[in-house]
Amino acid sequence: MKNTVFKGAATAIITPFDSENRVDYTKFARLLDWQIAEGINAVVVCGTTGEGSTLTDEEHRAALKFAVDHVGGRIPVIAGTGSNDTAYAIDMTKFACDIGADAMLVVSPYYNKATQNGLIKSFSAIADASTKPIILYNVPSRTGCNILPQTAAVLADHPNIVAIKEASGNISQIAQLASLTRGKLDIYSGNDDQIVPVLSLGGIGVISVLSNIMPKKTVEICDKFFSGDVKASTKLQLDLLPLINALFCEVNPIPVKAAMAAMGFCENTLRLPLTQMEEEHEKHLLDLMRNEGLIK
């Protein structure tokens, strides 16, 4: 039986930058500590929300190592090591294994994309090189490349491929995935507005953007569902939907960076091609955050 990396909510954590656009490790440490204190079940470092695609190779490795060292085994640290260059993804995965990351989040190739056969060969090569569990990451809206359920079912037979973050937004596809894999692959929602629907199909948690600002509530959605209180879990999901929608009204992580800056966790600094949130959108987001008591 394959080991489960985590159950519940993992934060796809931002990478705090200072006003000079350098990684701010003091704020990063504070953010990691706060997430753990709030009861988050795991963190994903240098993923989409962590702006891993615009970190230099040196920054990427340094941020991963810092997170692993600072967390010190308190919760699982999942390293974003995917790339559209399989050789680079293998190299980064080996590095993350060596520094003690608990698992890897590996996105499907973007821009050059792949056939389904290419996906099987690429993910298998990365998993072959890994000494730690691999979580596949399906986000076709960003990559232009969809990991079909039949492909995920083939990959589920690899001993190191243990889970998938499903951010296709297609509930019918996720149902088909669950039907084909039947417990051979842990399924995580990759969309905060679909946590309860994915859990209802046998998913075991979420890799979340919302939990950057509301870790405790995001964990609570999962915990209530797992305890059998589906009604309360669903109510939380629906109550938070306006805030979730505001966090995705512009390209992630633009809104969540603005939200975290308003909470004092970072500067509102992103790297091009990402720019700061449009004023009208930011005002709406901050109003919703005030309603939730997150800021004054």
Image (cartoon, rainbow, N blue to C red):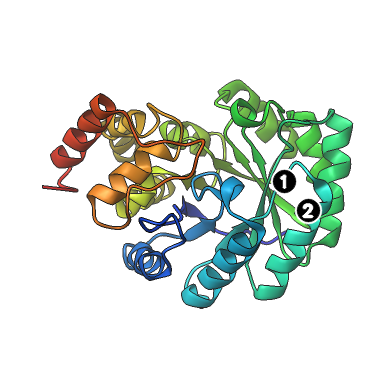
The label shown at residue 83 is: 1
Identify which residue is drawn at 54% across, 47% down: 204
What amino acid type should be assigned to the residue bearing mark 2?
Tyr
Residue at the spot x=49%, y=59% of the render? 43
Q: Which image quadrant for residue 245?
A: top left
Asked if 63 appears above or below 7 in the picture, the reply is below
Relative to 183, say whether 91 is above or below. below
> Eyeballing the image, is 278 above or below 123?
above
| Quadrant hosting residue 168 | top right
| Residue 258 visible in the picture | yes
Callout 2 crowding tier (Cα within 10 Å): few <14, some 14–19, many ≥20: some
Q: Is residue 275 left or right of residue 282?
A: right
Placement of 152 over or under 212, stated as above or below? above
Q: Nearer the viewer, residue 186 or 135?
A: 135
Q: Which mark is residue 88?
A: 2
Tell me which amino acid carries mark 1: Ser
Q: What is the residue that sits farthest to the front in this orientation? A: 20
Label 1: element kind:
loop
Instruction: Give the residue displayed 50% in from the left and 39% down from the top.
Output: 272
Query: Residue 278 at x, y = what percent?
Result: 31, 28
The answer to whether any part of residue 229 appears in the image is no
